[in-house]
Amino acid sequence: MNKNTVLGVAAGVGLGLGLAMYLPAIKRKVQELLESPRGVPGKRVVMVTGGTGLVGKGIETVVKDDPEATDNEEWVFLSSQHGNLVDREETEAIFRRFRPTHVIHLAARVGGLFANQKYKVEFYRENVIMNDNVMECCRKFKVQKLVSCLSTCIFPDQTTYPIDETMVHNGPPHTSNEGYAYAKRMIDVLNRCYSEEYGCKMTSIIPTNIYGPHDNFSIDGGHVIPGLIHKAWKAKQTGENLTIWGSGKPLRQFIYSEDLAALTVWVMRSYDEPEPIILSVGEEDEVAIKDVALMVAEASGLDVDSRVNYDLSKSDGQYKKTACNDKLKKLRPDFKFTPMREGIQKSVDWFHANYATARKGH
Ligand code: NAP
Ligand code: GFB
């Protein structure tokens, strides 16, 4: 062996030993990089779970024309096709793939009164597991901020009115949706726990009933407005009446999906408390289901005097859940809500124009 070969072998061995010594550290660094958000400073990578749903589509519409979104944000809208959030490995794969700096967590097992009554176990389990997976991934992948979605139906049933943000855990929810409600309540508990123990920035919004384009227009399992819109469409085709389920007396507050979307984007950018915030129209805008049905009938071109009746064999659900939007009004005194008649007309028009592809299942 000549001198050069000896030197070459020595260098090779040295390099090998050096690599072996540093390999674990290099591996750790690569792993760390893969598990950290990929945004450049000052830029957000915002991942929306449930991005194909009613609210997700609303956000997509709102950010399309928003200069802050185009200049300083990259938006990722997830559907269940990107992965099943009930599955831990699939959830981790999503976070590894998109490496978001911010997450708006909308994905959920969602449905109206009748679906909630029928599938309490699935509403509890799917939501608890999905929420646990998303929250833990936000911690693990160092997401800077998580905004999750609760609902005014998770508040105590026996309560004083109006309901405010401090009252989430003050008593059992209405029995019709206890599976969903308890699963959602745990998000609020964990927002505080993750903040205290790990310093994570996690918060939640509490919307009232929501409606708008891209809703789920299922008659059996959906919410009241999309259900009525679909039933009114059918009534128009067949000449039958539009039937309101229950007495029509319960009261609800409704928020148009694109209003909620704009407020959710604002929460993601500017609201920093772990405590939830109610995103709702005022108490004065609460309406009876009967009046909502008449608005839908009118917007659908049905004669409201002769073509609307009731099925009293169907449940009324919770009588009311009147929420107070004082906290929101204080922070966003400028915000203007879409008037309900206008929002309903837009939703009816959207359903008619997109009848073939609109969601109508479950
Ligand atoms: P939605 O229209 O029913 O959409 C649900 C979204 O979640 C869809 O994008 C769906 O994806 C996704 N999703 C469901 N299960 C999933 C899973 N296992 N893995 C991955 N993605 C999954 O719901 P929404 O009405 O927009 O509701 C948004 C949020 O608001 C929810 O957290 C809901 O609880 C809350 N909320 C809704 C209302 C209301 O009246 N609608 C009221 C208060 C609060 P695919 O499209 O691929 O199925
Ligand atoms: O939107 P909805 O199903 O849910 O509204 P909740 C139910 C109210 O509308 C009840 C009446 O008083 C029903 O009797 N209603 C009349 C109808 N016609 C219809 C119809 O065609 N379809 C439906 N669905 N209702 C849900 C909770 O409660 O609110 C969920 O169960 C969820 O957890 C959601 O959070 C926001 O407002 O009663």
Image (cartoon, grey):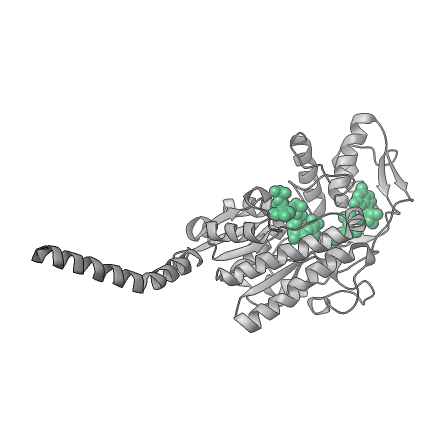
- Residue that sits furthest to the top in the current view: 238
Q: Please state which of residues 334 and 156 is positioned toward the viewer in this rendering.
A: 156
Q: Position of residue 123 (x, y in %)?
A: 73, 52
224 lies left or right of 128: right
Vertical order, 143 against 237 (above or below): below
Q: Position of residue 146 (x, y in %)?
A: 55, 60
For the point 41% across and 58% down, the residue is: 31
- Residue that sits furthest to the front in the current view: 1
Q: Which quadrant holds the C terminus?
A: top right
Examine the image and state in which quarter residue 331 appears: bottom right
Vertical order, 245 against 28 (above or below): above
Q: Please state which of residues 129 and 256 is positioned toward the viewer in this rendering.
A: 129
Examine the image and state in which quarter residue 275 appears: bottom right
Q: Please state which of residues 127 and 92 is positioned toward the viewer in this rendering.
A: 92
Q: Position of residue 18 (x, y in %)?
A: 26, 63
Q: How many marks?
A: 0
- Residue that sits furthest to the right in the current view: 313
For the point 77% across and 41% down, the residue is: 295
329 lies left or right of 10: right
Q: Which quadrant holds the N terminus?
A: bottom left
Whether residue 338 is visible to the viewer of this picture, yes or no, is no
Examine the image and state in which quarter residue 238 appears: top right
Q: Please state which of residues 343 and 134 is positioned toward the viewer in this rendering.
A: 134
Vertical order, 54 against 16 (above or below): above
64 lies left or right of 354: left
For the point 77% across and 54% down, the residue is: 286
Whether residue 70 is visible to the viewer of this picture, yes or no, is yes
For the point 81% across and 31% down, the residue is: 235
Q: Position of residue 206 (x, y in %)?
A: 67, 59
